């Protein structure tokens, strides 16, 4: 099978593990949220599935004062907190934890003593070595340089960088230069965890391996595309980081644009990492820049106020933050892709925190039929829609207009052709980080962002940031637990369209 589905067997029905060679993984920022919530639990799951060879070491590094036992206890407590429904057998955890170590280093400090780490890694130069930087991006350059100075960059060593890479094109370029001065591009794995999601991987298969879609996947047949990534959680404990980013930098620059690329790109010649990335970057380059003249029509900024989530009253963003901030927690954008395939078919992007439901969906809205043949209710039915649901309940639905059976004339309604992943496949879907971590060990770059992709995405996002600044676009308030500010509906309404909210499906 292809690289992008390489975790599945030929029939696609049951997961098949690809063995990896022994490795040493050094996680910087090991006592932080990402490491404890995602990375260590993902490694535990891979270990449980026998995918982590016993000679491998996972070494946590951070400024926090801890020893091996303290780190193991912290990791276990976090695992239980974030996976409350999973049983963890004490003996099983002990065996996993025997591969888990900890070293206290301030890795960004050029004068720090690296002895603890060099000592642990001494004699392991032949093993695949990976450095995972779960750190603020401003530290990536300094940590890379310090790693090299400490003599830790063994032959073939790889580095993993979390998003966001910078906060604009200039800072991203600076980071890429600094890391690139130490590691070659093919040793740099820039994470966008959406690329590790099962359903995101399936987008390529759905589009290019079903002949049904190819002839209609363009502006001749498609009216527009919607991409919604709605979260019900707020900024919460991450508010101080989030306030420096906002929804545009946190979600659109990376996850949303990656989804847009996979929906919009031309068919790649094969599934080699660079062939796919070459096609994605063409889409990013074809995105029409947003200007101060059209930013008010083409974009909406929003910020949640107090409201309700899961039936409970919740505070607004500024109350959570404890400051009066204008940072957007919601953004909607009308994006135009200026190329042959998409001329005239806009992509509407929408993402926000504290929205009604957690829901990530891509809607392909086809054009109306040339001439409606009548039937009462016809005018209320929108044309065919393909709904690709990424989360929470993964699946693909083709909403077709059909005749209500029985007497009563030509009454029409939507009936979905439904592919529910839960019904069709019994396998547990590994968390995106499980797949991504193993892809780094294997050296599979296909699920990671290349330098030019990241920079092209920033170039477009910078046009929006500049327009917002010039035109002083405010963040409109919306109540927590709703669909975002009313201006978001107006953005669609101006084009005679409305966001698909799942009704009727
Ligand atoms: C992260 C963002 O990259 O993605 C978070 O920084 C966001 O703000 C998260 O909550 C969403 O990921 P997922 O996998 O829950 O959709």
Image (cartoon, helix red, strand yellow):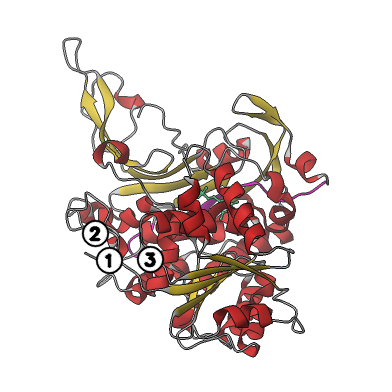
Residue 338 visible in this rendered orientation of the protein? no
What is the magenta range?
Answer: 323-343
Return the mark for residue 339: 3
Give residue 417's quadrant in the image: top left
Return the mark for residue 267: 1
In terms of sequence position, does the residue under pointer 3 or pointer 2 come before the other? 2
User: In the rendered view, would you say 452 is above or below 343?
Assistant: below
**In-image side of 50 versus 80 (left or right):** left
- Circle 1 crowding by C-alpha within 10 Å: few under 14, some 14–19, many from 20: some
Badge 1 vs badge 2, beta-carbon distance below 8 Å: yes
Q: Position of residue 404 (x, y in %)?
A: 21, 19
Q: Residue at x 66, y 25 (%)?
A: 312
Identify residue for label 2: 208
Whole-number angstrom distance, CA of label 3 to CA of label 1: 14 Å
Q: Position of residue 54 (x, y in %)?
A: 41, 67
Q: Residue at x 57, y 50 (%)?
A: 76
- Circle 2 crowding by C-alpha within 10 Å: few under 14, some 14–19, many from 20: some
Name the residue furthest top: 407
Is the CB of mark 3 within 8 Å of ligand 1?
Answer: no
Main secondary-structure element of the magenta-colored stretch: loop
Whole-number angstrom distance, CA of label 3 to CA of label 2: 19 Å
In terms of sequence position, does the residue under pointer 3 or pointer 1 come before the other? 1
Q: Position of residue 244 (x, y in %)?
A: 72, 58
């Amino acid at each position: 099978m292809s690289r992008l589905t390489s975790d599945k067997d030929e029939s696609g029905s049951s997961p098949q593990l690809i063995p990896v060679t022994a490795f040493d993984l050094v996680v910087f920022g090991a006592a932080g949220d990402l490491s404890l919530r995602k990375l260590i639990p993902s490694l535990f799951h891979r270990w449980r599935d026998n995918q982590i060879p016993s000679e491998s070491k996972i070494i946590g590094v951070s400024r926090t004062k801890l020893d091996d036992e303290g780190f193991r206890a912290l990791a276990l407590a976090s695992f239980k907190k974030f996976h409350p429904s999973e049983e963890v057998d004490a003996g099983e955890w002990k065996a996993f934890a025997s591969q888990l170590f900890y070293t206290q280093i301030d890795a960004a400090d050029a004068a720090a003593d690296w002895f603890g780490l060099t000592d642990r890694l001494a004699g392991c130069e032949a093993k695949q070595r990976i450095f995972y930087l779960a750190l603020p991006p401003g530290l990536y350059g300094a940590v890379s340089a310090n790693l090299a100075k400490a003599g830790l960059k063994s032959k073939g060593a790889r580095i993993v960088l979390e998003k966001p890479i910078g906060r604009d094109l200039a800072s991203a370029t600076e980071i890429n230069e600094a890391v690139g001065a130490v590691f070659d591009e093919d040793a740099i794995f820039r994470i966008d965890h959406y690329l590790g999601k099962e359903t995101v991987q399936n987008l390529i298969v759905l589009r290019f391996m079903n002949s049904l879609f190819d002839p209609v996947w363009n502006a001749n047949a498609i009216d527009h595309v919607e991409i919604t990534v709605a979260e019900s959680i707020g900024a919460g404990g991450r508010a101080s980081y989030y306030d420096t980013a906002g929804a545009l930098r946190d979600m659109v620059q990376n996850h949303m644009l990656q989804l847009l690329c996979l929906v919009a790109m031309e068919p790649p010649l094969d599934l080699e990492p660079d062939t796919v990335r070459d096609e994605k970057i063409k889409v990013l380059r074809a995105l029409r820049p947003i200007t101060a003249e059209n930013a008010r029509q083409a974009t909406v900024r929003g910020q949640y106020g107090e409201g309700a989530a899961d039936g409970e009253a919740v505070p607004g963003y500024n109350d959570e933050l404890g400051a009066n901030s204008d940072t957007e927690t919601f953004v909607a954008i009308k994006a135009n892709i200026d190329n042959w395939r998409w001329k005239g078919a806009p992509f509407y992007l929408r993402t926000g925190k504290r929205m009604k439901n957690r829901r990530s969906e891509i809607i392909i809205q086809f054009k109306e039929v040339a001439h409606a043949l009548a039937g009462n209710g016809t005018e209320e039915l929108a044309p065919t829609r393909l709904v690709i649901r990424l989360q929470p309940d993964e699946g693909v639905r083709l909403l077709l207009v059909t005749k209500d059976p029985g007497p009563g004339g030509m009454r029409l309604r939507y009936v979905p052709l439904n592919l529910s992943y839960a019904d069709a496949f019994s396998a547990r879907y590994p968390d995106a980080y499980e797949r991504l971590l193993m892809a780094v060990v294997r050296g599979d770059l296909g699920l990671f962002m290349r330098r030019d992709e990241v920079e092209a995405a920033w170039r477009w996002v910078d046009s929006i940031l500049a327009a917002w600044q010039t035109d002083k676009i405010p963040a409109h308030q919306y109540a927590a637990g709703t669909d975002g500010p009313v201006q978001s509906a107006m953005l669609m309404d101006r084009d005679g369209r409305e966001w698909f909210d799942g009704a009727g499906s």
